[in-house]
Image: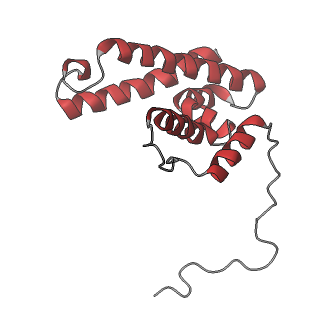
Amino acid sequence: MACVWGLLGASAIEAHQLHSAIGRVKNLPWKVQGELPLMPYLVALVLRLALGVGTAAAFGASGQAGGPVGVMAVGIAAPKVLEQLAGGKLAELEMLRAGRSVLAADQPEPGAEPRQAVPPDSVQSLQSDADSTRIPESVPDQRPGPGPAPAEGVGDG
């Protein structure tokens, strides 16, 4: 059942995004010049739905998402959930890859210093983070201790 709820969640967010795109361009987006054509849109749709189903199935099977609403929410948020599980490094690694492809295409003039899109220390940091398996650190309890809670609005003004 988790797969069904995940598919429903992923479908709901896709329907919302399509509705927004139709409102923005006042037509089906793939029929408007400059928007994503139909075939790439369909491929992205299938991938997004599969991502929602797979993530919801994993969370449902592990008990990490309780009940239909929780599993549906995981289906809706699947790309962000996976980005968080990867330590937020997915976007940085994509930028790194894009920077390397730009550097490879950009041939400097003879005798000129080559330009770098990403500083070398950032590249090393990203590579070491991507290559190592990271164990999440525990977060200390930051709840206030015993004693009176500060009154709201005190000192405002």
Q: Residue at x 68, y 31 (%)?
A: 65
Q: Which quadrant of the figure contains the C terminus?
A: bottom left
- Residue 107 located left or right of residue 21: right
Residue 5 appears in the rendering:
no
Residue 99 appears in the rendering:
yes
- Residue 3 located left or right of residue 142: left
Q: Which quadrant of the figure contains the N terminus?
A: top right
- Residue 47 at what x, y percent from top left? 50, 17
Q: Residue at x 77, y 25 (%)?
A: 62
* In the foreground, 67 or 140: 140
What is the image's colouring? secondary structure
Q: Residue at x 61, y 80 (%)?
A: 151
* In the foreground, 108 or 70: 108
- Residue 100 located left or right of residue 59: left
When the figure is inspected, residue 125 is found, relative to residue 44, above or below; the finding is below
* In the foreground, 118 or 42: 118
- Residue 133 at what x, y percent from top left? 80, 36
When the figure is inspected, residue 104 is found, relative to residue 140, above or below; the finding is above
When the figure is inspected, residue 38 is found, relative to residue 14, above or below; the finding is above
Q: Quadrant of residue 132?
A: top right
Residue reaching furthest to the front: 111
- Residue 126 at what x, y percent from top left? 67, 44
When the figure is inspected, residue 39 is found, relative to residue 58, above or below; the finding is above
- Residue 54 at what x, y percent from top left? 63, 18
Q: How many marks?
A: 0
* In the foreground, 123 or 74: 123
